[in-house]
Amino acid sequence: MIPSPITLILFASSCLGAMFTHSGDLPKREYDFVVVAGAAGAVIASRLTENSRISVLLLEAGGSNENVLDSMVPAFAGLMAPGTIWDWNFTSTPQTAINNRSVAAARGFMLGGSTSINFMVYTRGSAEDFDRYAEITGDKGWSWDRLQPYIRKVRTASAGARLALNFSSVPQNERFLSPPRDQHIEPAPQFNPRVHSFNGINTVSLEGFPKDINGRVIQTVRDFHSDFPFNLDMNSGNHLGVGWVQATVNKGVRSSSAISYLAPSIMKRSNLHVLLNARVTRANGKPSKGGKLTFNSVQYTENGGKTSQTVSANKEIILCAGAMMTPHILLHSGIGDSPTLKALGIPPVHHLPSVGQNFSDQPSLRNQWLVNSTDTQETIAQNATFTTEQLDRWRRTKTGPLVDPPNSFLGWLRLPDKAAIFQRFRDPTPGPRTAHFEFIIANGLLSRSTPATGNFLRFGTAVVQPISRGSVSIKSTNPLDPPVIDYRLLTSEYDVVVLREAFRRSNQFLSHPVWKDYLLKPPTNATTDEEIDLYIRANAGPMNHPVGSCSMSSRSAKYGVVDPDLKVKGVDGLRIVDASIFPVTPTAHTQAPVYIIAERAADLIKATWWH
Ligand SMILES: Cc1cc2nc3c(=O)[nH]c(=O)nc-3n(C[C@H](O)[C@H](O)[C@H](O)COP(=O)(O)OP(=O)(O)OC[C@H]3O[C@@H](n4cnc5c(N)ncnc54)[C@H](O)[C@@H]3O)c2cc1C
Ligand SMILES: *[C@@H]1O[C@H](CO)[C@@H](O)[C@H](O)[C@H]1NC(C)=O
Ligand SMILES: *[C@@H]1O[C@H](CO)[C@@H](O)[C@H](O)[C@H]1NC(C)=O
Ligand SMILES: *[C@@H]1O[C@H](CO)[C@@H](O)[C@H](O)[C@H]1NC(C)=O
Ligand SMILES: *[C@@H]1O[C@H](CO)[C@@H](O)[C@H](O)[C@H]1NC(C)=O
Ligand SMILES: *[C@@H]1O[C@H](CO)[C@@H](O)[C@H](O)[C@H]1NC(C)=O
Ligand SMILES: *[C@@H]1O[C@H](CO)[C@@H](O)[C@H](O)[C@H]1NC(C)=O
Ligand SMILES: *[C@@H]1O[C@H](CO)[C@@H](O)[C@H](O)[C@H]1NC(C)=O
């Protein structure tokens, strides 16, 4: 049959290179590896298809990231979620310790996963975080030192980062702190090139446009250095102190895992297929000779469950659906606590009671201070003329205030060693060079709920090594039902005490005279412990850094979901590579740690199959 012009057009619009939007267009039903979505999924698909003899299918429930303006413009990050077409729109169960509030649990619903909707903060965590993973798993390969080659595979040659060494070039490129209007701060180094690589795949760079608050933060850190020391580079392994944000931004545009690891040069590989709008419902296994289950196919639906498709994986299925959806897929596949699954009506195929357990997120407060300024992110929502001008500038030159994501500085800080709380709780940090709490400092925040008037300093505070643990579970046999997400946020009294202390320390930071004419109204008038706790319980929420629901543990451990090679314990053909495998949260915003484990996982997979 000779195709009519109409079918040609239809075909062209549904098939961009090896990117498919309809299951019917997939040229085959059998691949070596089937990878399910995610930030890490793009890494795995990209690295495995470096070998042209290996075929990989990447399945993603959401749509394409291409030409999604709000995803590309860093300053628009806060518009991506919650409650948009790019979000799964999950909400938590009522959280008992925060006045029974249900909170939004944002998750990216598009290629690149949450890296296509996140705030782009790039933090690796502390060296002690990774050394603890090595200790928990009994695999030295997870230690900070041994992971360095993978860390460096990620970090890149952004023009911005290279220019960063040339401090004299500040005026032309607007990448550095220029002297704020009211005080003189000389351009000073903002990162340490020795701990970075300049030829990786995913671009990371420094702030590109100076913010109203920068000079004040730097001045405070100088004068209050014994309490808030400056850290030139929080990604060196020793993250304590206050420093400049590094972000996954490439010359003013978001660099997600889809943009970097699935760039056009990679998508043209004939051994890599990507299918969008494909929601995985379960993985199927069959008993092999020894009786062990071997997983070798994946079921998915592309039209709200009306039809079910199956695709085979000859070698492995790699789940990268994230800390909320990977356990959901496992449970619907019959992998979990067998009695619980049976009671629900799902035939158990493999008893693994840790699936969905030990789930955690970092409790945080977005403290908003009303400020004496019109030069904050809120202006983008409030002044259409300004935004039209700046968007035009961004489109033409990739300069101006839209080139940066919201956060400018982070602080990683500890409680005093002798803090009273340690008489009641064991210090949950992996060592003395890892933070208990964090400051997240932003020159305002653009979001879908930005008020019509008022400009704010957003001085976030968070517990970055919480003790509370929750769970992800399911409540029906329907795989299209959302997971049941229970953070159990702040259910440990320790977390409340640390969040209270973090809030007090933020007030101490802002007591420097440099903030005096700037801050007009505090986020709360609470001052006593009791008042601050009321404020906390009324306002705290998760950081959107969920981890732990499919924890990695040592080969001999009686708990855990994956072994140190990230293979699901007790079965064959199934691996997990996403934020769910961290046995404890990294003391970080989680994307960089996920990129790091994904790079190593790709090598572990190659070591299994490349002969
Ligand atoms: C609003 C927000 C802001 C954040 N800000 C930062 C930040 O500034 N810095 C930082 O380091 N981290 C940040 N994070 C966290 C970071 O983005 C994640 O840690 C990172 O993306 C890895 O997450 P993950 O492994 O859980 O999977 P995700 O990246 O969430 O990927 C999961 C993928 O699986 C897909 N999927 C799920 N279920 C199915 C299914 N059944 N079938 C097919 N596909 C499926 C999803 O659509 C998604 O693409 C943020 C997250 C959010 C939500
Ligand atoms: C999330 O909610 C928005 C707004 O209601 C909706 O448009 C979008 O389709 C929802 N996302 C998903 C994955 O259902
Ligand atoms: C939360 O809900 C539980 C159960 O419904 C109830 O016992 C408790 O009093 C509620 N707590 C608050 C603070 O409202
Ligand atoms: C600094 O700029 C000069 C001139 O543009 C360039 O040749 C040099 O490579 C730059 N230095 C670094 C370390 O990138
Ligand atoms: C949760 O993690 C701890 C170790 O931190 C472990 O002892 C426990 O068994 C885990 N629980 C489950 C249900 O996996
Ligand atoms: C809005 O932005 C325009 C262009 O930058 C500026 O001229 C104007 O003063 C702003 N309006 C207000 C109310 O700040
Ligand atoms: C706001 O700042 C200006 C200087 O920029 C100052 O004159 C004014 O008094 C400040 N307003 C308040 C309410 O502090
Ligand atoms: C704080 O302000 C609220 C009103 O916003 C008021 O009801 C409350 O009494 C104040 N608390 C204190 C301790 O001043």
Image: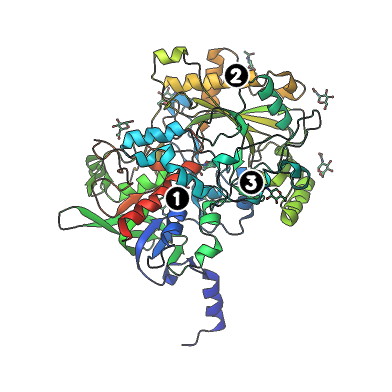
Q: CA distance from mark 1 to mark 2?
A: 37 Å
Residue 149, label in figure: none
Where disc 1 sits, the SS reads helix
**Quick one: which residue is furthest to the bottom in this view?**
1
Q: Is residue 289 above or below residue 454?
A: below
Mark earlier in primary sequence (1, 2) = 1
Q: Residues within 10 Å of mark 2 (few under 14, many from 20)?
A: some
- Nearest the viewer among 275 and 279 is 275
Residue 605, picture quadrant: bottom left
**Quick one: which residue is furthest to the left in this view?**
290
Mark earlier in primary sequence (2, 3) = 3
Residue 40, label in figure: 1
Q: CA distance from mark 3 to mark 1?
A: 24 Å
Residue 227, label in figure: 2
Assess whether mark 1 and mark 3 are in contact (beta carbons under 8 angstroms).
no
Q: Is residue 30 above or below residue 176?
A: below
| Residue 131 image position (x, y, % from top left) | 40, 34
Task: Look at discs 1 and 2 and give the one toward the viewer.
Answer: 2
Residue 161, label in figure: 3
Residue 360 visible here: no
